[in-house]
Image: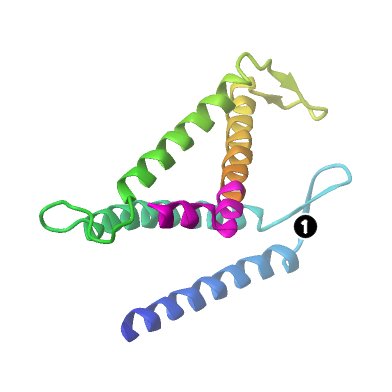
Amino acid sequence: MIKTEKLSRTVLNVCIAIILVVFAFFFLYGYDNPMGDYNEPKCTEAVIYLMYVLIGVTAVLAVWSAIKSIKDGMGASGENLSGVPGGKISFISVVLLVGSLAVGLLTNLNEPDFTAADGNVTSGAMVSVVDMFIISIYILMAVAAIAVVVNMSGIVKKSAQKK
């Protein structure tokens, strides 16, 4: 367990160091003026690539963690060892995620293309995708907040003790 904590602390410190270096270059290196009075930091692409790498690594680790926890949570015979209905919770979570994405997509279908002031054309489909994820985040945050309030109120524990 100590090796895991040491490795975790080392990885965290390396990530923080890389992020600090990239953001120091971003803010301190200089600016480019691509259009009139607008300033663009010269290291903008480095920040974007860093975000891509961090999101990619996070996605891979999330999938790996989910698979590992499902595998570890089930015994050799397949029964649930902890007494927590993990299968039901996982199923409800996936259904809620897919449902919230579907609601977000359906609310923004047929979004028209539009042109920004600088002449760039923005795709209506991409606007719909971004709106879909934003609406999904709102729905999932509301459900998480409700779950926390219900858990803190003790309603679930009281009903489980009556049985």
* In the rendered image, the vertical position of residue 153 relative to residue 118, given as above or below: below
Q: Position of residue 117 (x, y in %)?
A: 83, 28
- At horizontal 28% and vertical 52% (from top left) the residue drawn is 67
Q: Amino acid at mark 1?
A: Tyr
The residue under label 1 is 31
Most extreme residue toward the right is 37
Q: Position of residue 18 (x, y in %)?
A: 54, 71
- At horizontal 66% and vertical 58% (from top left) the residue drawn is 43
Q: Position of residue 142 (x, y in %)?
A: 62, 43
Q: Secondary structure at mark 1?
A: strand
Q: Confirm whether residue 53 shows in the render.
A: no
* In the rendered image, the vertical position of residue 34 relative to residue 7, given as above or below: above
Give the prevailing secondary structure in the magenta stretch.
Answer: helix
* In the rendered image, the vertical position of residue 71 relative to residue 88, given as above or below: below
Would residue 155 be found to the left or right of residue 121 on screen? left
Q: Position of residue 59 (x, y in %)?
A: 42, 51
Q: Nearer the viewer, residue 28 or 10?
A: 10
Would residue 60 be found to the left or right of residue 132 on screen? left
Q: Nearer the viewer, residue 46 or 84?
A: 84
Q: Which residues are magenta?
A: 146-163
Q: Confirm whether residue 108 shows in the render.
A: yes
- At horizontal 57% and vertical 29% (from top left) the residue drawn is 129
The image quadrant of residue 82 is bottom left
